[in-house]
Amino acid sequence: MSIAQTFAKAKAENRSVLVGCMPAGFPTVEHSIEQMIAMHEAGCDVIEVELPYSDPVMDGPVIQRASDIALANGVRTRDTLKIIEAVASAGATVVLMTYWNPIEKYGVDAFARDLAAAGATGLITPDLIPDEAAEWIAASDAHRIDRTFLVAPSSTDERIAMTLENCRGFVYATALMGVTGARKAVSSQAPELVARIRSIDPEMPVGVGLGVGNGRQAAEVAAFADGVIVGSALIRCVLEAPDRAAGLRDLRALSAELADGVRDR
Amino acid sequence: MSAPSLPDLAGHFGRFGGRFVPEALIKALDELDAAYRSAKRDPEFQARFQDLLLNYAAVPSLLYRAPRLSEALGAEILLKREDLNHTGAHKVRNVLGQALLAKRMGKPRVIAETGAGQHGVASATAAALLDLECVVYMGETDTQRQALNVARMRMLGATVIPVTNGSRTLKDALNEALRDWVSTVETTHYLLGTAAGPHPFPELVRDFVGGIGVEARAQCLEQLGRLPDAVAACVGGGSNAIGIFHAFVPDESVRLYGFEAGGDGVETGRHAASITGGSVGVLHGNRTYLLQDDDGQTIESHSISAGLDYPGVGPEHAWLHDTGRAVYEPVTDAEAMSAFQLLCRTEGIIPAIESSHALAGAAKIAPRLREELGRTPTIVVNLSGRGDKDVHTAGAYFGLLDQVETVVPGENT
């Protein structure tokens, strides 16, 4: 299912889309595939695969640690593409989130081509703003990959409008001024930001990320956003589990809880 | 050729520079850009900056003709004595400029990243002087290697936060400072330590340290009645080099040489030579040359000099390299240490190991220039910092420390 279809379906069901994030190759390639499929089966509508990167400035300690583990275990960009292929083949809607340098190193057009061939529908770029994205915009158009750029509470209306013009699929609203990681309370800046986005473009689906960690918070965010993006809390299920079986069980349980949350808005 | 109009309004030096950062930081960068542009035109700001440089930092620094070093190298060597500045390096120029800018923007808190601790100490100094709260991020490995600088920063009232992510060195400290900034941007100025990072930092830092070259150029004209044949500087992130190069860029007869940290030798892979041993990519907010693997993951750099131990380089250097206006070459740890010793013994000046790379580079180009010019060449070397902080490293390198007892004169007292 494309991102647009996923958001349309959720809208018809009067709920939000649940986007679950997991670094590729964490802790190994095989395990990350298993985890992502478990998340998909337990109710994540979209699997956001994060390409592990050595210098993830937008991420908090949990995703950093998971990325470091994946890299230490030798994950390569081509492994990430294989993982996407496996998870998409299992029926999940897959988007990739990546810092920009690995794409530039791979070759921007070649990456868009291979990403599409692997079955991903979109790419989220946390450190690429549309101002610097001419090559990516051309490549993603050529290979029909949806583009998700970020907007933040600090973004001016002009920048939000410009960013929305360059997004396709959905826009990623960073709920607060900070890095990824579950928080005790949902940011009060998020509803205001979503309202500003809607006033500029009522059609573009808005996914809200940063800080959501449980079903109650998912419901809170689902009340005003089209999509709820959860990363660190899911990753922590694996990081903190005593063994693999427990990790997968916790991951399924939290995915299901979050899936209930996005339906309980 | 470098026109004064570079970078463009979006911070591009040709294909280099720009802004590769989360959207959350764009507003802060725009505000900084606007504040800097207005400060640049404000005579009061400029007067305050110049006053601090003159009466607090002991700038302009001397341009010293080094007779015994000149004789040893077969070239007329002029040392730009940035080591005599307050805090012992060129970096004081940048921190004073940026701290004044933070004041102007009404931001009560500054954060900084530091490797060896020099930029951290300089930032803590400026923060103390201008009554700003100061938080310094430093890789945990570096806080252990540079315990004295940690103590210095704390004496000056700064909070030092050891960074335990990734390789626990400068690049990770920079990541952590960026993460702090994303969360605190309303009240905090990020006092970036080199002419790299997202626009407007490369331009702003260059301008704050650009006095080095302006002074050196005028001092050459005054003392020699002509321009030098070459200017040499060490390049890590590249602030001291861009600081001395910039004023000379339009002078086509003046050759510009940047000497990168070659570590064990570029061919060994253990080095910090981003231009000579790296490739083009994006790191820490700008497109430049960097050390990366086939997947675009940053490779850890290696250098005996903590100040040059960084896997990227400022975008203007990348551009000067591509255009051919400046030449970048590696200098190994061994070559740098030999130049370190030479300056100690010929001139009674203990240089920073960073600056020793520039001295070693000057020694390499002297015979080439002599052949090319058919006369004794004149080379200005940016002596960007003093070596007090390196006494321990150099003492260990040369086997000058007594056995287990590692009391460093003047440092451990």
Image (tube, coloured by chain):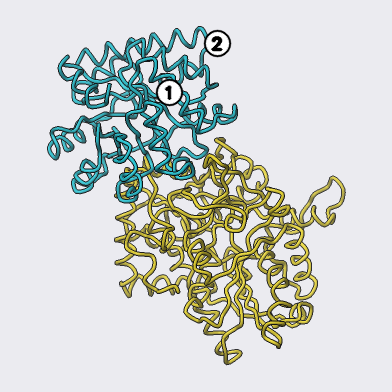
The x and y percentages for residue B399 are 85, 54
Secondary structure beneath dot 2 equals loop
Q: Secondary structure at mark 1?
A: helix
B355 shown above or below B272? below
- The one nearer the camera, B246 or B144, is B246
In the depicted structure, whether residue A52 falls above or below residue B83: above
Q: Which chain is yellow?
A: B
Identify the residue at horizontal 69%, vertical 72% (top origin). Answer: B362
Residue in the picture at 50% in, 56% down: B193
Residue B304 visible in rendering: no
Q: Which mark is residue A85?
A: 1
The amino acid pointed to by label 2 is Pro
Chain bearing mark 1: A
Q: Which mark is residue A242?
A: 2
User: Residue A120: where, in percent of width, then height?
Assistant: 36, 28
Mark earlier in primary sequence (2, 1): 1
- Judge from the rendering whether residue B120 lies leftward or rightward of residue A197; answer left or right: right
Question: Could you tell me the amino acid type at mark 1?
Answer: Glu
Q: Quadrant of residue B387?
A: bottom right
Report x, y in % for residue B294. 56, 41
Q: Which chain is cyan?
A: A
Q: Quadrant of the N terminus of chain B?
A: bottom left
